[in-house]
Image: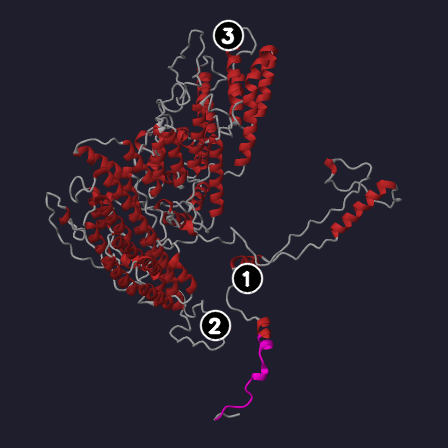
Amino acid sequence: MEGEEAFLASLGGDAINDVAVQQSEDDDDDDYDPAAPSGGMSTAVTAPEQSQATLEVPEQPSRTASRTSQKQTIVGGFVAEDSDEEEEQEQTQEETKTDGALALETANTASPSVPQSPSLLPVRSQDQTPTLPVDGVSNPVPADESSNQPPNGMVVDQSAATTSAAVDPSVIESAAGSFPSAQTTSAALPAVPSAVSSVPKSRLPNDIIGQLEDRIAEDLKGDVDAWLSLVAHLKARGKFDEVRKVYGRFFEIFPSAADQWVAYARMELELDDLPRLEAIFNIALLKVQSIDLWNIYLAHIRRRNDIATDASGQGRQIVSQAYEFVINQVGQDKDSGQLWQDYIAFIKSGPGVPGGSGWQDAQKMDLLRKAYQRAVCVPMSAVTALWKEYDSFEMGLNKMTGRKFLQEKSPAYVTARSSYTALHNITQALKRGVVPQLPPHPGCAGDDEFLAQVDIWEKWISWEKEDPLVLKEEDAAALQQRILFVYRQAVMTLRFYPKIWFDAAQWCYDNSLEADGTSFLDQGLEANPESCLLAFKKADQVERTIPAEEGEDSIVSKGKAVRAPHDGVLDQLYKHIETLLAREKADLAQIEAKYDAMSPDSREGTPEPAPEDDDDNVDVNKPLTKKARREREIADRKSETLTQTRLTSKTITYVWISLMRAMRRTQGKGKPGEAIGGMRGIFKDARTRGRLLADLYVATALLEHHAYKDPAAPKIFNLGAKLFPEDENFALEHIKFLISTGDSTNARVVFETTVSRVTAKPENAHRARILFAFFHDWESKYGELSQVTKIEKRMAELYPEENLAALFSQRFGTTTIAPPPFDPCSVLLVLSPSQIRPKGVAQTVVPSIEMTEAAPLGQAGYVQSPKRPLEDSDAELPARKLLRGESPLKGAAGRRQQQRQARELGHQSTPSGPKPLPQAVFQLLSIIPPARQWNQTLFDPAKMVELIRATDMTKARVGNPAGQYA
């Protein structure tokens, strides 16, 4: 809407001088003047020209930035590499170390021998003596008591696995430090590093590291390939210290990228840097929940605790506890079959013989039976093999008791086996452990693949909620844990998809898991600080759970708690606008530099020839000069920024509206500038920060009117009319308000004024259609016939393409006239250029020419006898002997051989279709639109012939008119 464009553009211009208004202490409603706020607030006025394609605005500091002045972090690069690829010198990096980088870089690099402190790693200690129970055997942690408890010697901060992805660098000062607690709240969301810098400096062609660093600095979240390429390049050159720094920065953005954590751990394992490997375990194990990472952890534990030379049995006890801990964490995963098999093999390797008479024999038998009975109830790929092993185990001990145990577990095994088949069919195309990606915009590259993955995750979650393992009646807690596990796996991959976080939190709240629900919301807001959906849900949960108490202090504290999530998302949205404008500035500079570097155009400065009658040779879409190409490219770039900025401004507006409504419920009407500001204080703060659309004025006026019947509502509408004089949607709401209050005279004035302004430019006439439709409907029901006829006449002049009969019939029907709805919770902002990358050649190829695949030619091989065919294993072998002519077979065998030969001859004679097109032609066909999309008017010979046939030549004028030559 051009009214919005004018207001947004006007924010960069001069503002009206502030007018200070002293508010009376008795809060008289008649004295409240929304048009004259105090506190240095400026009200923007609309500019007369509304065709600006860009927004030049002064930088406005966010709420967080205004409180504390912080340095901007700049992602540093590296100097250009020498052609002989000698040792490179690292550029001076002025960036602030991220938490993840500090945590991984300070993992005790000074000394190879690290004193072991209690940690996630149950490392064997020389001074420690095994704790033995009465029977003299080390007790493993029971499964029902250790689902969330680490083994002996492990001190794990469980909050780190469920609260935040950030890492506290102060807690990892040694390789075996305790797992950090990184709880954050939405009130203090982490600042997103700026993804835009000035025009990047030119790099040498062989400066691969610098080029990749530039790509990363430009698009932190979107250019995943640049991150991975940089890591691979540094690894190939053996610069592992630089790899660690890159990984530290990478995991600040993608803390749930399981495959990259595994690759990082394997790198440290190959380098035999065990302190850093243990630091990775402390940071990532409970947070990532990856089977591969847990397997590396178990291998490390077994390496540090050699059970072959363990005379005391303490090492075996530590390894056993580690296995129990890992199985309690990820043993229910559908891909945990190998983990269960390794665990059972470890138990079998212990001392004792199942079925023996000693205490070790009895203990080993009990451990094996318990492990088998737990494993055969899990839907996984190895469940059938484990059931066969369990059957042999029980029947080898005692057939009578074995049948009893097998009959007890048989229903659970059958259910698990069938459930795994169903689950495998659902998830066979699922990609787990990959680097999370930003959701592509609909119709852009990667949107189909992304939505397909989302659909698979949602199907898996729905499948778990249906309780296919029949756990709800017998073990409801186990069912909840399975659903929670799938949600945690889903948010790892769909980290930047807010809806999955919302669904997980909502399910937790619905099932009395308040702590888990809050954890999902906090983590989701940390990953998606610009998400209105999660911020609104967080504020709603805070408002619902904090009880209402008497006293001003409780009202103020509740208002702050409700406001915190809104402030977080507002800070990110205002920062996003600054990012968009900075990115536009950099792109425009690149465009100017590109055209300045071009050779002078020979046609530059010469007037373009006027088009002649023959329009077939004129391409109206192709600029003829370099100047025209430059101007078109600049205009397109400004238009793109204007569209994205308008969408962000509208989202900001609706966040303020949500906050204003919440503060009205929490603090009431309030008073600007006081502790209990209420809804009026929010209205003032919103106008102070700017970037608002007319929707805020409509919502505020309607709140004043419906909630308090306050006379300030008309004042707010009048203020909005001054700021948005050509906004048709605002005018429509203003007219509706005036009609609802019985002021039809002023409603007509607003209608006529707005329509006159909008239709002054013919290209904007379509915007007034919604106003004409509403007033035509209202006059038809409650006005005079003359007014109805007058409006219909004006509509016929402005919109000649409309059907007059349909317009007439609208008098007697029912119509719903409203502006298009806007949902801030479903807005998909363009946080990265990768989200709006067009579908290129590599993604989808839609050729305009239908091509049939060439049929595979049959291979002439050994023709077997119809009575004794070849074995299946010999079907693809070459001929074993030369064929010779032989007498035709008789009877049914001969007929079958003749039919087979006829089919083979027919198959070989089938044409193979046209030859494949060259790659260049194929790419061209994939780029140009198909013929069916060409909707221009073409010359139709058939219609021309029909016209000539229908022309009555006898009525043609033969003679020349008077005064004309023959």
Which secondary structure lies at badge 3?
helix
Marks 3 and 2 close (CB-CB < 8 Å): no
Find disc 2 in the rendering and name its residue: 618
Q: Is residue 626 left or right of residue 669?
A: right
Q: Earlier in the sequence, mark 3 or mark 1?
A: 3
Q: Is residue 353 magenta?
A: no
How far from the left and from the top, in percent, is residue 693? 28, 53
Query: Which of the two discs, 3 and 1, sits closer to the camera?
Result: 1
Choose between 559 and 269: the one closer to the eye.
559
Q: Amino acid type of disc 1?
A: Ala
How far from the left and from the top, in percent, is residue 41? 18, 51
Find disc 1 in the rendering and name its residue: 931
Residue range corresponding to the magenta coloring? 947-962
Figure quadrant of the N terminus: bottom left
Q: Is residue 230 left or right of residue 93?
A: right
Q: Amino acid type of disc 3?
A: Trp
Give the class, few, some or many, for how many residues have Cα within 10 Å of label 3's Cα (few <14, many ≥20). Answer: some
How far from the left and from the top, in percent, is residue 131? 40, 12
Q: Is residue 956 magenta?
A: yes
Query: Which of the two discs, 3 and 2, sits closer to the camera?
Result: 2
Find disc 3 in the rendering and name its residue: 359
Q: Is residue 846 left or right of residue 245?
A: right
